[in-house]
Image (cartoon, helix red, strand yellow):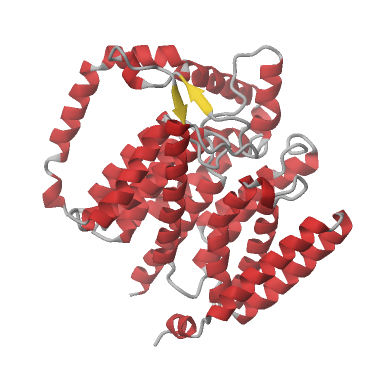
């Protein structure tokens, strides 16, 4: 019996219950106390979390992953969230404490290209904060890289192979968010005023541009996210995972139903970035899970898709011109790149993580510019805020993570995870939530793939 399985047998329900009770007590103390007492309570709670993690690392890992998906719901329920409490901060500090203890107990501490990238982003965010340029109004640019790095190291150095546990949590969270998004789009309920003061409506109803009688105005499902593109990115990650799971048994209704719910939820977001990412991810999940002999029809299918797209080109062009989606992004990207090139000293390491969204683009908009308040491209964000060095680190991470499973293809969870990661990354061409909640999920899946590759190389 391996050490991980032996430890798993000794995890008791009392361990998990103990962690949840501790979190509840810490939250109650933090809510009811004044600022100094709250800080003291948080420090004591972190010390207790570290002690319990040392006693039961596997239990702490599982609770930490569960709370990653519970915290977003706590953040949007007014009865559970007083204005002075930010559960994401508490979670980020707690999961970082758990990750430090897990890494300290690991016999061989793993720190790969993904950890190097996230550590570089975190350092860049802290430097920008200390310089006082960008983060005075939004410390989330420090919080989420810290949380993502902690979760990545936690999964990478865990004593168990937790891919099934993580996939279940991602699908369960995505299904709940998808149902919320569908309800918001069709029924205009529920409204989470903590996340967004009102539901989103836009002129993105594609049928209204093709068929008479259909309205162009639609409701954009956003779930508990602050913007519908956030939910679109999540479902672009989850749909390929569910689709890959369905491919293992296409006749299973219990696999078809979640896939249908996720696809419907993605459609109801009306996030074009999410649509593109989900499509690319599902294609890759299919391609990666099938042997070469069964992929001979893919060129024919691709040619058919191109012909259909060409026949609908006038409608598609009218749709994008009317919604002004592409033009606003192109104006923002052109302005950001020109600004970056004009400051040659910033080319190697960028302006600092969080700088464009917090100062440069907002200043341009306040001066009457036509730029968007955010960069709307995760890859461009890395280039501008982390420089050429950051883009090299990101490329190193992508190649080292994806290449082993593209070269050696086959059915299984690796193909689903690969499709989900690539689907999310494809959505980040037009959006920038790479280092937020959904990005944390994608990096955690990447850590599972890195563990699987390391075990394969070890024999």
Q: Is residue 348 visible?
A: no
Please tell me how many numbered marks the rendered image carries. Answer: 0
Residue at position x 67%, y 66% from top?
23
Residue at 71 percent of width and 28 percent of height: 359
Q: Quadrant of the N terminus?
A: bottom left
Q: Quadrant of the C terminus?
A: bottom left
Q: Residue furthest bottom?
A: 1
Residue at image location 50% in from the left, 85% down from the top = 10
Instruction: Determine which quarter of the picture holds residue 198.
Output: top right
Q: Is residue 259 left or right of residue 320?
A: left
Query: x%, y% of residue 100?
Result: 65, 68
Q: Position of residue 240 (x, y in %)?
A: 33, 47
Q: Is residue 324 visible?
A: yes
Location of residue 424 with respect to 93 vertically, above or below = above
The relative height of residue 337 versus residue 268 in the rendered view (above or below) is above
Pinpoint residue 280: horizontal percent, then vertical percent: 32, 39
- 429 w.r.t. 101: above or below: above
Which of these two is toward me, 351 or 168? 168
Residue 306 screen position, x and y as percent: 21, 25
Q: Is residue 112 left or right of residue 250?
A: right
Give whichever of 238, 192 is nearer the camera: 192
Does residue 154 sit above or below 332 in this rendering? below
Residue drawn at point x = 21 percent, y = 16 percent: 311
């Amino acid at each position: 019996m391996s050490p991980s399985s032996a430890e798993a047998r000794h995890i008791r329900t009392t361990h998990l219950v103990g962690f949840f009770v501790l979190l509840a007590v810490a939250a109650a103390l933090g809510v009811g106390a004044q600022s100094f007492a709250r800080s003291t309570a948080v420090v004591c709670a972190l010390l207790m979390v570290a002690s319990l993690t040392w006693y039961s690392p596997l239990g702490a890992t599982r609770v930490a992953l569960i709370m990653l998906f519970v915290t977003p719901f706590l953040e949007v329920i007014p009865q559970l969230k007083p204005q002075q409490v930010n559960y994401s901060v508490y979670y980020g500090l707690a999961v970082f404490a758990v990750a430090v203890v897990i890494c300290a107990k690991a016999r061989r501490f793993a720190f790969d290209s993904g950890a190097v990238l996230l550590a570089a982003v975190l350092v860049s965010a802290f430097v920008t904060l200390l310089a006082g340029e960008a983060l005075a109004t939004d410390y989330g640019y420090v919080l989420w890289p810290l949380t993502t790095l902690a979760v990545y190291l936690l999964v990478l150095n865990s004593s168990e192979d937790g891919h099934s546990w993580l996939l279940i949590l991602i699908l369960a969270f995505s299904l709940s968010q998808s149902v919320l998004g569908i309800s918001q789009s069709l029924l205009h309920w529920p409204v989470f005023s903590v996340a967004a003061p009102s539901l989103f409506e836009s002129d993105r109803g594609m049928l209204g541009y093709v068929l008479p009688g259909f309205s162009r105005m639609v409701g954009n499902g956003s779930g508990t996210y602050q913007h519908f593109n956030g939910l679109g990115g999540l479902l672009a990650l989850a749909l390929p995972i569910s689709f890959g799971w369905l491919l293992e048994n296409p006749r299973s209704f219990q696999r078809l139903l979640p896939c249908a719910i996720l696809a419907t939820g993605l459609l109801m977001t009306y996030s074009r970035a999410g649509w593109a990412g989900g499509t690319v991810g599902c294609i890759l999940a299919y391609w990666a899970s099938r042997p070469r002999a069964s992929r001979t029809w893919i060129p024919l299918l691709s040619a058919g898709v191109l012909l259909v797209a060409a026949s609908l080109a006038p409608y598609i062009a009218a749709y994008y011109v009317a919604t002004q989606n592409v033009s606003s992004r192109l104006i923002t990207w052109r302005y950001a790149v020109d600004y970056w090139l004009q400051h040659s000293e910033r080319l190697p390491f960028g302006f600092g993580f969080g700088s464009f969204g917090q100062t440069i683009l907002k200043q341009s908009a306040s001066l009457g510019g036509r730029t968007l308040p955010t960069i709307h491209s995760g890859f461009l964000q890395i280039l501008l805020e982390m420089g050429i060095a950051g883009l090299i680190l990101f490329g190193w991470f992508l190649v080292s993570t994806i290449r082993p499973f593209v070269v050696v293809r086959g059915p299984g969870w690796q193909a689903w995870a690969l499709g989900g990661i690539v689907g999310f990354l494809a959505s980040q061409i037009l959006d920038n939530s790479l280092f937020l909640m959904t990005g944390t999920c994608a990096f955690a899946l990447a850590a599972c793939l890195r563990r699987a590759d390391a075990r394969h190389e070890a024999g």
